[in-house]
Image: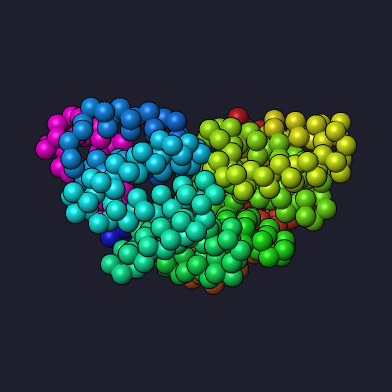
């Protein structure tokens, strides 16, 4: 996460000293500070429960309260529960104005913009998100949330029919994120890039961007993001004529979405697209074959779903991995393989091993080539299976 403070959780408004509010104030501060944990790790229901409790026991005006309000609205919006989300956003906007908390106002505009997007109000969504992004650019605020706002604006741009603008905005996200090793907002930029390429009908480019997003989201254990990646990869599979793969991806997607409380952010546009593609797949395969494949996808655990999404039709590793002729890695390549399995990016591998980025890139290419994998996610899934077999 990018942050301009020493506290990695200190994004948005600055927390009040715990001693000022007592235990209730500490609870409010903690519930808001766990924003990324509640959202990315799939604990949306738990997050809303604790935020509701904290907000109810400490109703004093404070910047901690503005943060807790927009975080609670953000979680509700992500679940597609827009009515309570808007109530939290309304209260946050009023309180931020009272406290002259301009940073909180910009953040609530950002997430209100996404909520309007999911309700289908795309013009209003674009206006709100543009206002928020403009504010953050003007004050020079760069952290995971403000970069995420750029990706959110790109998402709206896709839906209003401007994928070129979306791709430019995603490139801006990369320019902010990559020098700092930021991965959370960057993973969403890759996902939106995939959506933009899908919108343009360039499905191979869409798949490449989505696989980049999937690599990062799997490493971060971002269940929301993994669900979104598997969903769009199913759409790409339909467009590429691979109904069997699409069928299993739709099944895996249903299980992943169910774990976080609701599919596709409650967006009517995205849900309609899902329904259209799923029905198209059912007609291509026939109901019996579709149901069999769909249920097989539903039964997959997370690592299996990730391997399916990143791999070939059968998502199996190359035979070279299991036979006696499996190629040997050098000691350095073995180190690199284990770091790849942990989800580290090339830059992080270079830093860990004290080598140049170019050297790290070369090792990564050799490891994937020798082991017969096309992506980091396939390698990570294989390592997970080996660990499971040894346990």
Q: Which residues are magenta?
A: 6-31
Q: Relative to 287, is 9 on the left or the right?
A: left
Residue 347 image offset from top left, x and y in percent: 48, 64
Taking the magenta stretch, the answer to whether it contains residue 26 is yes
**Where is residue 165 drawn, in percent x and y?**
54, 69
The x, y position of residue 348, in whole percent, is 47, 60
Q: Give the image's coloring scheme.
A: rainbow
Q: Is residue 334 left or right of residue 63?
A: right
Total numbered labels placed on residues in the image: 0
Quadrant in which the C terminus is drawn? top right
Q: Is residue 133 left or right of residue 16?
A: right
Q: Residue at x 59, y 39 (%)?
A: 263
Q: Residue at x 65, y 35 (%)?
A: 254
Picture quadrant of residue 367: bottom right
Residue sitting at 60 percent across and 44 percent down?
A: 268
Q: Residue at x 48, y 42 (%)?
A: 78
**Along the viewing direction, whichever of 95 and 295 lies nearer the viewer:** 95
Q: Nearer the viewer, residue 67 or 98?
A: 98
Note whether 317 is above or below 336 in the view shown.
above
User: In the rendered structure, does residue 362 fall within the stretch colored magenta?
Assistant: no
């Amino acid at each position: 996460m990018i942050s301009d403070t020493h506290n990695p959780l200190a994004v948005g408004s600055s927390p009040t000293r715990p001693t000022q509010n007592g235990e209730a104030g500490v609870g409010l501060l903690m519930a808001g500070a766990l924003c990324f944990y509640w959202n990315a790790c799939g604990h949306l229901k738990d997050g809303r429960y604790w935020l509701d409790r904290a907000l109810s026991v400490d109703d004093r005006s404070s910047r901690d309260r503005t943060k807790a309000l927009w975080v609670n609205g953000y979680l509700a919006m992500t679940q597609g529960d827009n009515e309570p989300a808007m109530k939290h956003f309304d209260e946050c906007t009023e309180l931020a104005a009272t406290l002259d908390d301009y940073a909180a106002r910009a953040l609530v505009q950002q997430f209100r913009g996404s909520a309007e997007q999911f309700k289908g109000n795309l013009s209003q969504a674009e206006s709100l998100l543009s206002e928020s992004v403009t504010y953050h650019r003007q004050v020079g605020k760069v952290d995971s949330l403000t970069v995420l706002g750029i990706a959110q604006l790109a998402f709206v741009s896709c839906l209003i029919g401007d994928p070129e603008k979306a791709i430019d905005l995603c490139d801006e996200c990369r320019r902010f994120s990559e020098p700092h090793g930021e991965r959370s907002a960057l993973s969403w930029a890759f996902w939106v890039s995939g959506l933009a390429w899908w919108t343009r009908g360039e499905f191979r480019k869409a798949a490449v961007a989505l696989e980049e997003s999937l690599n990062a989201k799997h490493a971060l254990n971002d269940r929301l993001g993994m669900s979104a990646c598997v969903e769009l990869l199913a759409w790409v599979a339909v467009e590429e004529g691979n109904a069997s793969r699409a069928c299993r991806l739709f099944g895996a997607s249903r299980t992943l979405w169910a774990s976080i409380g609701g599919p596709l952010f409650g967006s009517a546009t995205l849900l309609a697209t899902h329904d259209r593609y799923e029905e198209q797949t059912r007609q291509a395969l026939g109901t019996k074959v579709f149901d069999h494949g769909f249920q097989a996808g539903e039964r997959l655990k997370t690592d299996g779903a990730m391997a399916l999404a990143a791999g070939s039709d059968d998502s199996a590793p190359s035979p070279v991995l299991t036979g006696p002729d499996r190629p040997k890695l050098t000691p350095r390549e073995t180190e690199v393989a284990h770091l790849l399995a942990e989800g580290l990016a090339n830059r992080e591998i270079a830093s860990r091993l004290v080598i140049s980025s170019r050297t790290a890139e070369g090792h990564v290419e050799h490891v994937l080539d020798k082991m017969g994998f096309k992506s980091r996610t396939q390698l990570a899934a294989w390592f997970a299976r080996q660990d499971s077999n040894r346990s």
